[in-house]
Amino acid sequence: MDLKIYRDKQEVAEQFSAYFVEKTKTEGTFHVALSGGSTPKIVFDVLAKNFSDKVDWSKVHFYWGDERCVPPTDDESNYKMTVEHLFSKIKVPKANIHRIRGEEEPKTEAICYANLLEINLEEVEGTPQFDLVILGMGDDGHTASIFPHQINLWNVEDHCVVATHPESGQQRVSINGKVINAAKEVAFLVTGASKAEKVKAVVEKTEGSQAYPATLVDPKYGNLVWFLDEPAAAKLN
């Protein structure tokens, strides 16, 4: 585990963008699973503004770790947020953007997206392997859309699952824990003081932390990197 702690959200965004650029310099196609949320939004802005000419976007293929079951025009859509903050500002081929179709029937779309991953990605031990999975973490310790009350979804056979938000009841399509842990690299982007307690629990694996899906992130074939701002890292020993 590699902990990178920076002053604030803006510095996290700048440093992660530089890290992302370096990762894309590998030979051949680069497959990345994106995250939604407020921190990736800032990252995408910085990436588009300051680094767009430093990446060969024709070789980068974009996917999502999870998506809310809403149309792509809905303000809650992770896809829409990424279009507004990144895709509309860079020269990426449309064929390289592989969105989860939130407007479709959730179980059907979970199957379709799992099939897409199987077709597009190389596999390790029967699991599709991303070059990079970007994750956020909720105040409740959830990651992707695997929530504590459905932690059993983490290791199910299906590569993609249908999850339900514990408060709103909104359905989401999410990759499962096996896909996350099969990635060559996993990067957490976590900022803000509200996350500090869960960051401590997950990173230091304190008593009871196994109830949080984020604790189960443990890449088998690559590195786990945390990009934190000082408020999120404040309670770490």
Image: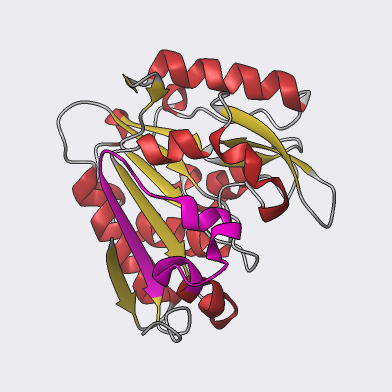
The way the protein has been coloured in the rendering is: secondary structure
Side of 46 where 215 appears, left or right:
right
Viewer-proximal residue, 43 or 23? 23
Residue 78 position (above or below residue 204)? above
Can you tell which quarter of the image residue 105 is in? Answer: top right
Q: Kindly identify the residue that appears in the image at 34 percent across and 44 percent down.
A: 219
Bounds of the magenta span?
Answer: 201-228
Residue 72 position (above or below residue 94)? below
Residue 104 position (above or below residue 2)? above
Q: Kindly identify the residue that appears in the image at 45 percent across and 16 percent down.
A: 118
Q: Position of residue 185 (x, y in %)?
A: 30, 45
Q: Kindly identify the residue that appears in the image at 60 percent across and 79 percent down.
A: 194
> Is 33 included in the stretch rendered in magenta?
no
Question: Which quarter of the rendering shows the N terminus?
Answer: bottom left
Question: Which quarter of the rendering shows the C terminus?
Answer: bottom left
Q: Kindly identify the residue that appears in the image at 76 percent across and 29 percent down.
A: 103
Side of 44 where 5 appears, left or right:
left
Q: How many numbered tags mark residues here?
A: 0
Q: Position of residue 211 (x, y in %)?
A: 61, 59
- Residue farthest along the front direction in this orientation: 207
Can residue 50 be seen from the camera position used here? no
Viewer-proximal residue, 87 or 228? 228
Side of 128 where 195 appears, left or right:
right
Q: Position of residue 161 (x, y in %)?
A: 64, 31
> Is 226 included in the stretch rendered in magenta?
yes
Can residue 102 be seen from the camera position used here? yes
Side of 229 where 21 appears, left or right:
left
Viewer-proximal residue, 32 or 220? 220
